[in-house]
C-alpha cells in the first residue's frame, strides 16, 4: 500500500492563527485538492491527521468540524480523488492526551486502521515541527510545505531527512515522479 499522511490546516487548506472555525473559513490552498486527486489516481491511500484544539477552546464544535471535513471530502471527490481516513485531536495543549501532535497517537490510529505495524517509509506532510515529529515517531518520512506555518517552521531546525517543498502539489509532483 502506498500511504501518505497529510496535516490539514496549512497543507490542504489555508491556516489561521485565529483557527479555521467555520465552513466559510475553510478555504483550500490552490492546487491541494487536485494534488490529492492525482495521488488517488496513481493508487495512493490518503489519510489526514489534524490537531483541532479549537474544539477544546470552544471556538467551534464537533458538528462544525464534521461539516468542514465533509466539505473537504466533497471538494476532493469533485476532483476525482478521495481521503480514505481523517483522524483529529479535539484536545487542547494542556489536556494531556496522547493524540495531539507532536505525540504519535493519531499516527498510531492510522497505522492500526490500515493494518500496519508502523508508518516506516510513509510520507508525512506538514507545515510545522509537530506534524513532522509525530509522524517520524512511527517511522514516517518528513515533508515540509512552505504554505501555512511552513516558512516559520523553516526558521528552526528541521528533523533529519526533511524534504522541503513549496506546497502539497509540489510534494505530489515529486512523489509521482520518483515512483515512475
Image (cartoon, helix red, strand yellow):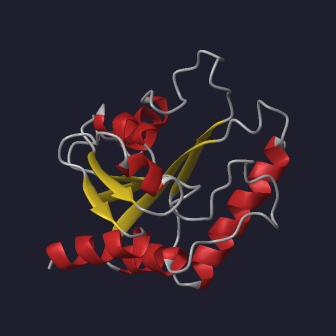
What residue appears at the point 49 percent right and 33 percent down from the top-left corner? Answer: 101
Q: Is residue 38 above or below residue 44?
A: below
- The quarter of the rendered structure image containing the N terminus is bottom left
Q: Position of residue 53 (x, y in %)?
A: 69, 35
What residue appears at the point 49 percent right and 36 percent down from the top-left corner? Answer: 106
Q: Is residue 140 above or below residue 177?
A: above
Task: Judge left or right: residue 101 versus residue 170.
Answer: right
The answer to whether residue 127 shows anywhere in this view is: no
Q: Is residue 2 above or below residue 169?
A: above
Query: Total label count?
Result: 0
Q: Position of residue 154 (x, y in %)?
A: 36, 50
What residue appears at the point 62 percent right and 24 percent down from the top-left corner? Answer: 93
- The quarter of the rendered structure image containing the C terminus is bottom left
> Image quarter for residue 25?
bottom right
Q: Position of residue 139 (x, y in %)?
A: 24, 38
Q: Residue reaching furthest front?
A: 155
What residue appears at the point 42 percent right and 62 percent down from the top-left corner? Answer: 146
The answer to whether residue 78 shows anywhere in this view is: yes
**Foreground of the two, 154 or 134:** 154
Q: Position of residue 98 (x, y in %)?
A: 51, 21
Q: Residue reaching furthest bottom?
A: 79
Amino acid at each position: 500500500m502506498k500511504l501518505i499522511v497529510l496535516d490539514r490546516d496549512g497543507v490542504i487548506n489555508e491556516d489561521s492563527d485565529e483557527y479555521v472555525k467555520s465552513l466559510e473559513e475553510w478555504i483550500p490552498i490552490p492546487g491541494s485538492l487536485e494534488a490529492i486527486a492525482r495521488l488517488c489516481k496513481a493508487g495512493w491511500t490518503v489519510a489526514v491527521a489534524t490537531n483541532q484544539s479549537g474544539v477544546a477552546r470552544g471556538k467551534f464544535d464537533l458538528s462544525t468540524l464534521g461539516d468542514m471535513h465533509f466539505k473537504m471530502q466533497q471538494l476532493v471527490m469533485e476532483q476525482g480523488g478521495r481521503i480514505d481516513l481523517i483522524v483529529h485531536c479535539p484536545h487542547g495543549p494542556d489536556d494531556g492526551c496522547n493524540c495531539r501532535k507532536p505525540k504519535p497517537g493519531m499516527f498510531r490510529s492510522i497505522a492500526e486502521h490500515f493494518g500496519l505495524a508502523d508508518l516506516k517509509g510513509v510520507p508525512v506532510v506538514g507545515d510545522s515541527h509537530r506534524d513532522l515529529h509525530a509522524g517520524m515517531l512511527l517511522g514516517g518520512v518528513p515533508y515540509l510545505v512552505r504554505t501555512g506555518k511552513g516558512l516559520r517552521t523553516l526558521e528552526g531546525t528541521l528533523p533529519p531527512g526533511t524534504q522541503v517543498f513549496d506546497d502539497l502539489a509540489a510534494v505530489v509532483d515529486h512523489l509521482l515522479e520518483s515512483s515512475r
